[in-house]
Image: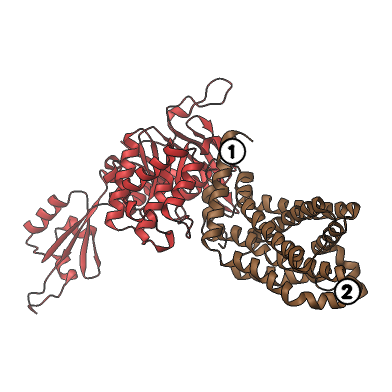
Amino acid sequence: MPREALHRTGALVRHNTMLMLREPGPLASRMVLPLAFLILLHPLYEQAQRGQRGIAQAVIATIVTFSLLAMSIAGSTFLTERIWHTWERVRATAAHPAELLIGKAVPVIAALLLQQAAVLGFGVAVLRLAVAGLPLLALVMMAWALTLVGMGAALGLLARSLSGLSACYDIGGMILSSLGGALVPLTAMPAWIRHVAPASPGYWAVSALEGALRGEAGRTLTASAMLLAFAAGACLIAVVRASRGWGRSAQL
Amino acid sequence: MLTKTGWPELATVGTTGRPRTAAVLAAEGLVKRYGAKNALDGFELAVRPGEIAGLVGHNGAGKTTFVEIVTGLVRPDAGRVFVDGVDALRNSRQARRLIGVAPQEQSLYVSATVRDNLRLFGALAGLRGSELRASIDQVAAELRLTQVADKQIGLLSGGQRRRTQVATALIGTARLLLLDEPTAGADPETRAALLAAVRARAAAGVAVLYATHYLPELADLGATLVVVREGKVLARGAQHDLMAGLPGELRLRFASQRAGAWDPQPADAAGSLPAELARRARHVDGEVRIASADPPADLAAILAAGCAPASVDVRRPDLDDLYRSLAEAASHAA
């Protein structure tokens, strides 16, 4: 990346981080709620599945469910640009659309990683969660964060209003999370759900996290590759939408 | 002098396709269609260094579409645009480095401060470190924003937001400023600050394209006029030259002698006007309105005929008169 582009991207990352921190409410709730959920519900999971399996299920359920809901951080950061008409304004500068997207994505990825790290850290420190493959876990966390930011960006760039976006995250997040077997193991779900589960990125996130915690490299890498494929598809939609702009005919 | 559009500097030479031009902004044969509507239909324009070109036209005339094409937000269906010699359609990002833009709609980060907004757009314009900080302070002072520099945009008045919007265009070293209705709804203080800043940039050699509906503002700026209608530049030249010869209007009100109170009777009064003026008279809202290329002479003729209006207003020709006149000229030519 040329020096000028690096400088611009750095300025965009700083600016977007500042915007996120200036309104910390959504970020704080996405950090606190998962921990509260985990504290309250881990006894239930431990009782249902006994020992490490129950702890792992509780931690994974929390990570996948709440990180899907945290897609709203990504989506609203893009949608807000459209509401403020700043997206067209920054597109009229020398910055390349990729620089604009990286500038927006980096702070969001950092927030999503922080959320996952907080839940995992709590699981390890308080619940004695065993992690067999730490490097694999880092890989999964990054792949999952990229998937979430890609899907969040695509939704944020396609949505027509904040309420519409919010409905997408709340309903879509819960469906993808449940469908993926995060909240309830797939073995306990109806057969048809087991058939459609692979269509949910939540399924691959659960699979990748389980694989990483158990140190199963093959399973982890396959699931992470699937997550990255979801991420690539979502990013493609976002880039096409972002580089076309909205013009004055847009609703926002 | 009313000049035809499409300035001669647009001619190209050699194999580079680069125009032999002193113009900072040169547009040639731009066409942009939205469905069946031609937003631009053979739009041609050149703006030289230090020139303020006032882009005037009714809503939907094509002003904003042109600005969006120059900034690379919209691709034309045909035509060429050069910014300081750079092909803005082929090398859009390189061209955008040379442009400062203030769009028609407010486009500011509402939860950020004035300084944050200026810092971002300054950095995207290529400024950094102490140079960036000094530019922020300078532009904020120029547009009277120093006192509110650390306030969030959401807490500012409309005028302060307007000034911030223009400040994001002025920060940096743009060779071309595109200002789309920068003073719309602005108070006198805001307008004065903005016009002073624009004048200063033009004096430093920056070319300015200034879209507006307010002709007096363009007169204040000493701007040339670019009259746009239905996606075409209808006329181009100095405001004084374009407006010269356009008829203004005499507006006469008459008081009733019988009632002893204010009671306009334009029909009766018009009856006593000199015949030549009566032919041009219209009765509107209790007034007699007479199109007049020479209001003092016509008023003298009215008084000489024994007609005694209670009040007389002289309306100068405005943008509507110019459009009408140019449209009539165009249809006659056709």
Give the alpha-carbon distance from disc 1 to disc 2, as whole Å: 53 Å
Q: Which mark is residue A50?
A: 2
Residue at image coords 49%, 40%: B125
> Which of the image's four quarters has the C terminus of chain A?
bottom right
Q: Nearer the viewer, residue B322 or B10?
A: B10
Frontmost of labels 1 and 2 is: 2
- State which quadrant residue B184 falls in: bottom left
Residue at image coords 42%, 51%: B115
Residue B43 lies, with reference to residue B35, above or below; the image says above
* Amino acid type, mark 1: Ala
Residue B257 lies, with reference to residue A207, above or below; the image says below
* Amino acid type, mark 2: Arg
> Would you name the residue on which mark 1 appears?
A5
Q: How is the image coloured?
A: by chain
- Rendering colour (chain B): red
Q: Nearer the viewer, residue B279 or B47?
A: B47
Where in the figure is residue A103, as x and y percent of width and height? Answer: 60, 48
B144 with respect to B77 (left or right): left
Q: Nearer the viewer, residue B193 or B122?
A: B122
- Which structural element holds mark 2? loop
Give the mark, 1 or 2, whose residue is nearer the N terminus: 1
Where in the figure is residue B80, as x and y percent of width and height? Answer: 54, 35
Disc 1 crowd rating (10 Å Cα; few below 14, some 14-19, many 20+) is some
Q: Are marks 1 and 2 on the same chain?
A: yes
Where in the figure is residue B298, as x and y percent of width and height? Answer: 14, 53
- Rendering colour (chain A): brown
Question: In this orientation, does residue A233 appear?
Answer: no
- State which quadrant residue A144 falls in: bottom right
Give me the chain letter of mark 1: A
Residue B88 lies, with reference to residue B269, above or below; the image says above
